[in-house]
Image: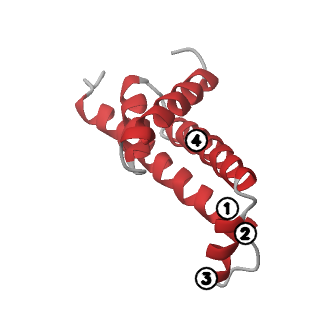
Amino acid sequence: MKSSFQKIVIIIAAAAVAELFMPWWIIAVVAALVAIWDNADNAITPFANAFTAISILWLGYIMVLDITTNAILSNKIAALLQLPSKNYLISITTFIGANVAGLGGLTGHYFRKLFAKKRY
């Protein structure tokens, strides 16, 4: 694969489709599969690609839902969790999803390295 941008776009597209039919944690599986398919030299690249992709996807999706519903639900959940504003809720949710995907990408990278032939 050529660039990180292409990998990020692939993760965004695959995760967006997969989340329509499966649970939210499918993002880790999608990130792991893309990392297995990719042959990255270091472990930071798959983590960063998956982290960035899901951050963009989830933040965009949350913002669309928040704008179309006039922030009714997010304000109520933020009040229920005793957060100062809905922005904290949006940030925390995005960060959790991005970390799950990043760790999925890291798992896929190390899974590929586990079965790769070593060159001496």
Distance in Å between CA atoms under marks 1 and 2: 6 Å
According to the image, label 4 marks what residue? 48
Numbered tag placed on residue 80 in the rendering: 3
Q: Residue at x 66, y 85 (%)?
A: 82
Indicate which disc, 2 or 4, sits on the residue closer to the N terminus.
4
* Secondary structure state at the residue bearing disc 3: helix
Residue type at the position of mark 2:
Lys
Distance in Å between CA atoms under marks 2 and 3: 11 Å
Distance in Å between CA atoms under marks 4 and 1: 20 Å
According to the image, label 2 marks what residue? 86
Residue type at the position of mark 1:
Ile
Q: Which of the two residues, 71 or 31, is positioned nearer the viewer here?
A: 71
Distance in Å between CA atoms under marks 1 and 3: 14 Å
Indicate which disc, 1 or 3, sits on the residue closer to the N terminus.
3
In the image, residue 43 above or below residue 73: above
Residue type at the position of mark 4:
Ala
* Secondary structure state at the residue bearing disc 1: helix
Residue type at the position of mark 3:
Leu
In the image, residue 17 above or below residue 100: above
Q: Which of the two residues, 55 or 23, is positioned nearer the viewer here?
A: 23
Within 10 Å of the Cα at label 3, are there few (<14), some (14-19), or many (20+) other Cα atoms? Answer: few
Residue 27, picture quadrant = top left
According to the image, label 1 marks what residue? 90
Q: Residue at x 64, y 67 (%)?
A: 73
Q: Is residue 26 left or right of residue 76?
A: left
Contact flag, marks 2 and 3 (Cβ < 8 Å)? no
Q: Quadrant of the C terminus?
A: top left
